[in-house]
Each structure stands twice: as C-alpha cells, then as structure tokens.
Image (cartoon, rainbow, N blue to C red):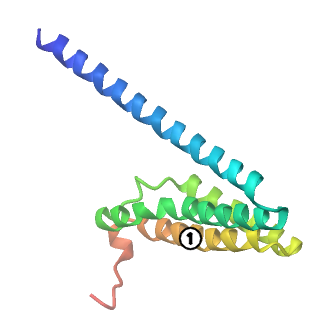
Amino acid sequence: MQVVAEVDLLQRSEEEASLKMSGLLMMVFGIFAMIAFVSLQFLDPPSRQMLVGYLSVASLITMFASPLFIINLVIQTRSVEFMPFYLSLSTFLMSMSFFAYGMLKHDYFIYIPNGIGGILGAIQLALYAYYSKPVEERRHPLLG
C-alpha cells in the first residue's frame, strides 16, 4: 500500500513539473510574440533594430552569467563537480569567436555581450583550474 502511494506521489510531482515547464515555455513564446508584434506594428526599422538589439544584448549577458551562480557552490564545496568543464570551455570559445566576428563587423550588438561572455567564461575556467586540483596542491607552503 505504501509503495503505491509513493508511486502516485512521484507521478503527481512529475506531472506538476511538466505542467510548470509547459507554462514557462508558453510564457516565453508569449513574450516573443509580444515583442515581435510591438516592434512590427509600432516601430520604424531603425528603432526596431535598436529595440531587438538591446533585448538580445540583455538576454545574451544573462545567458553567459547564469552558470556563474554555481560559483558560490564551487567555492563552498571546494569541488567542481557541479560545474561541467566542457560547458565552460565551449561558452568561452564560442564567446571569443563571436567577439572577434563582432569586432570585424564593427557591430557592438555582437561584440559587447560576447566580450562579456568571454570574460565570464575565462572566470569559470580559472575557477575550474583552481578547484580541480586536490586541496593539498592549493596550499602555499611558504604561507603555512
């Protein structure tokens, strides 16, 4: 009887999580549709480009900064098990390549967020390099 109750509880929590994710997805689509409608109906092309450019810069910086929320956990646990190396490396490399592209095209909507993403990716890689070593190697022998 208890096993049936636990299975039922697990199914309900999975359904609630699925419903929550569907709601968030619908919210993202709604925001996208609202931005597209407002920019197409009420803005001229240069203003539309500026609006969409600034929104893109904000979303890219947010995307690049989101893995940094794990930094506190990495520092507290002194372990990089919660920060995947290949994600940090690919973020850094992709940011730097788009930064270079933006610089060549003289497009600040490309190079500003990707330059920030490159810096944040470098911070992640530095943390990974520091905390992936065993604790004994991180101590400075002359400092005690």
Instruction: Tell me the quarter of the picture where residue 7 sits.
Output: top left
Image quadrant in which the N terminus is located: top left
The image position of residue 22, as x and y in percent, is 48, 32
The image position of residue 97, as x and y in percent, is 77, 64
Which residue sits at x=45%, y=71%?
130
Image quadrant in which the C terminus is located: bottom left
The image position of residue 77, as x and y in percent, is 30, 62
> Which one is nearer the viewer's eye here, 13 or 31?
31
Q: Which residue is mark 1?
A: 120
How many numbered markers are drawn? Answer: 1
Which residue sits at x=29%, y=22%?
12
Q: Residue furthest front?
A: 42
- Say above or below: 55 vs 20: below
Q: Residue furthest top?
A: 1
Instruction: Tell me the quarter of the picture where residue 121 sits.
Output: bottom right
Q: Is residue 125 at least partly visible in the picture? A: yes
> Which one is nearer the viewer's eye here, 48 or 54?
48
Q: Secondary structure at mark 1?
A: helix
